[in-house]
Image (tube, grey):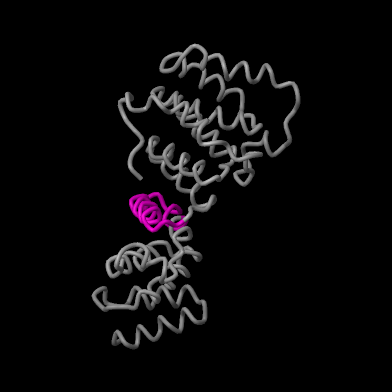
Amino acid sequence: MADDDLVARLRRGLEAKDPSATAQAFVSIDPVTPLPLPLLAATSNLLSLHRHNTAAYSAFERGLALADGPAALVKAGLNFNALLYACCREPSMLPSARTAWRVLGEAGVAPELPPLEKYIGSLLESQSYDDAFGVFLTAIDASLSPSLKTSAALVGCCAAEPRLAQMSFAVFSTVKAAGGQLPPELARGLARACLREGTLEQAEAPPRHFRDTSETPPRHLRDTSDCSAPLAASPQPTLLMSHLGHLSSQPRHLLSL
């Protein structure tokens, strides 16, 4: 089938909001066939929302090669947050998620919480701990409140990597400042890591927090299994940065995202 016919099928699939027909037409088009940027953006958007993850990224990649900078993709209507979420559905697509996250930032697009948390989860699964903490900091800077489940996963990193004690303690302090409460076992693990890589004052803070908590917090602050439950208030970036100021002396640093 000629590419002109396939492009026509692609347009019909988009008009009908039919992800299967759109994906089938798109992957059949010769990669060197030039396609308008808005058409590629619309294709990526529809496929991202309907779990055609690889094809969605391919449409984005073709658009990125044609675009005069990331801002042109925004102007064409690309939904960067939907693309990021799609790339995080499959562990094998983490490199694609990294690219989507980088270009999202270069385009000046504000991250949304669901794809941002999905990306943090993907980074943690791949043991890219420094990057995960960097994304968490981006969330705080954007006045987003990651859920207790995400915060707990970050705090728990120091059990596997004690060198992360300072960053884990910063997340713990943010949760505490927002009125949240993490499971006691995480507090004990954090205390042990702080004894090795932090200060005595930091090591004493998690257990003391649980001893000093006399009132039972609301359920959404206690149940870390609910990923949709945000912290009660957006933590302040200065709180985190005050605990992360020593990072320049650490063996590894927050990577450039």
Q: Is residue 60 above or below residue 150?
A: below
Q: Is residue 45 above or below residue 205?
A: below
Q: Quadrant of residue 24?
A: bottom left
The x and y percentages for residue 74 are: 41, 66
Left or right for 173, reference 80: right
Q: Residue at x 36, y 55 (%)?
A: 106
Instruction: Find the residue positioned furthest to the top.
Output: 200
* On-image quarter of the C terminus: top left
Residues 40 and 233: in front is 233
User: What main secondary structure does the magenta stretch of the protein show?
Assistant: helix
Is residue 182 within the magenta segment? no
| First to last magenta residue range | 85-109
The x and y percentages for residue 57 are: 37, 63
Instruction: Find the residue positioned furthest to the left.
Output: 32
Q: How many callouts does the rendering have?
A: 0
Is residue 94 within the magenta segment? yes
Residues 138 and 220: in front is 138
Q: Quadrant of residue 196?
A: top left
Residues 44 and 146: in front is 146
The x and y percentages for residue 22 are: 43, 76
* On-image quarter of the N terminus: bottom left
Instruction: Find the residue positioned furthest to the front.
Output: 238
Left or right for 144, reference 47: right
The x and y percentages for residue 236 are: 55, 36
Q: Residue at x 47, y 78 (%)?
A: 14
